[in-house]
Image (spheres, helix red, strand yellow):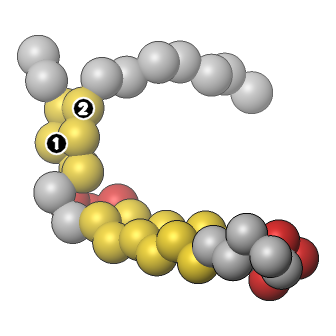
Amino acid sequence: MMISNVRGEFGKLAGNVRFDPEHLEISSITAEIDVNSSARGT
């Protein structure tokens, strides 16, 4: 297996943060990234 760093950006992404300081157990973060929207720099 090989791992490398690639610079770029995603054009389509969405996210949601749910935070309740009095009930941390129900706090959450979700993210969706459309991998087909990636653009790499040269």
The answer to whether mark 2 and mark 1 are in CB contact below 8 A is: yes
Q: Residue at x 46, y 75 (%)?
A: 16
The location of residue 10, given as percent across then percent down, is 24, 51
Residue 19: tell me if it is visible. Answer: yes
Q: Residue at x 63, y 73 (%)?
A: 19
Q: Is residue 8 above or below residue 9?
A: above
24 sits left or right of 31 in the view: right
29 sits left or right of 32 in the view: right
Q: What is the quadrant of residue 11 in the picture?
A: bottom left
Q: What is the quadrant of residue 24 in the picture?
A: bottom right
Q: Which amino acid does the dot numbered 2 rest on? A: Gly
Q: What is the quadrant of residue 40 in the picture?
A: top left
Q: Which residue is mark 1?
A: 39
Estimate how packed mark 1 is, as few (under 14), some (14 to 19) or many (20 or more) residues with alpha carbons within 10 Å: few
Sooner in the amino-acid sequence: mark 2 or mark 1: 2
Task: Report the disc number at residue 8.
Answer: 2
Q: Residue at x 37, y 22 (%)?
A: 6
Q: Residue at x 47, y 18 (%)?
A: 5
